[in-house]
Amino acid sequence: AHEWIQMIDGTMEAVPLKPDLSAADGQPIHLFKASDAPWLNANRTPSKKQNSYVTDGCELYRTKTGQLLMLWSSYDRGSYVETVARSESGKLAGPWKQLAPLVGNDSGHGMLFKTFEGQLMMVLHQPFRRAHGKLFDMEDTGDNLKVVRPRPDLDGPVP
């Protein structure tokens, strides 16, 4: 992720790797920029302030039907959101279609995992400052992800 600190309109890019996972020669592959998300406040003007066009906290996920998704975080109207994009080609190079945010309420840096019983879940931080891990039951719909329900019953004690 090239962040707002570097570029104002943050980008997601892929860096080619060697078999030993070190960076290969060549330029990064541009995937998308934050302002490609249609849900962003269209009246906002990019600025050098935080809350501009942020790209952060990505994770790739292949759905049960083979679709390639990317979880990523950004700001929308001053609040952090966890959102998702889908590769229209099914390949990392895209093109990427921006889908609706999954979770608002100042949430981000989501990661998917499966429980020992096979339930797909997402963990993310909420709120942005003084964050706590929050868990959600998720559904793989084949072409997207869906929050089934928050799981506050699994939240640990707040210090």
Image (cartoon, rainbow, N blue to C red):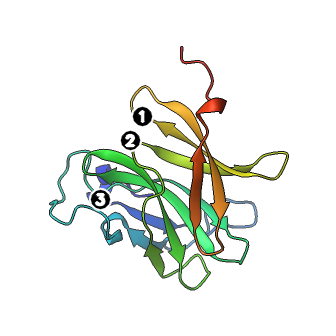
Q: Which picture quadrant has residue 55?
A: bottom left
How far apart, in angstroms, are the residues tagged by discs 3 and 2? 22 Å
Instruction: Tell which of 136 and 26 is nearer to you.
Output: 136
Q: Earlier in the sequence, mark 3 or mark 2?
A: 3
Q: Disc 2 designates what residue?
A: 106
How far apart, in angstroms, are the residues tagged by discs 1 and 2? 5 Å
Secondary element type, mark 2: loop
Q: Is 152 on the left or on the right of 36, as rendered?
A: right
Image marks 1 and 3: residues in contact by CB distance under 8 Å:
no
Amino acid type at circle 2 is Asp
Q: Nearer the viewer, mark 1 or mark 3?
A: 1
Q: Disc 1 designates what residue?
A: 127
Image quarter hosting the C terminus: top right
Residue 148 x, y percent position in the rendering: 60, 54
Instruction: Tell which of 24 and 69 is nearer to you.
Output: 69
Kindly identify the residue that appears in the image at 41 percent across and 72 percent down: 32
- Label 1 crowd bin: few (<14), some (14–19), many (20+), radius 10 Å: some
How far apart, in angstroms, are the residues tagged by discs 1 and 3? 25 Å
Image marks 1 and 2: residues in contact by CB distance under 8 Å:
yes
- Numbered circle sitting on residue 43: none
Q: Disc 3 designates what residue?
A: 7
Q: Is 135 on the left or on the right of 116, as rendered?
A: left
Secondary element type, mark 1: loop
- Label 2 crowd bin: few (<14), some (14–19), many (20+), radius 10 Å: some
- Label 3 crowd bin: few (<14), some (14–19), many (20+), radius 10 Å: some
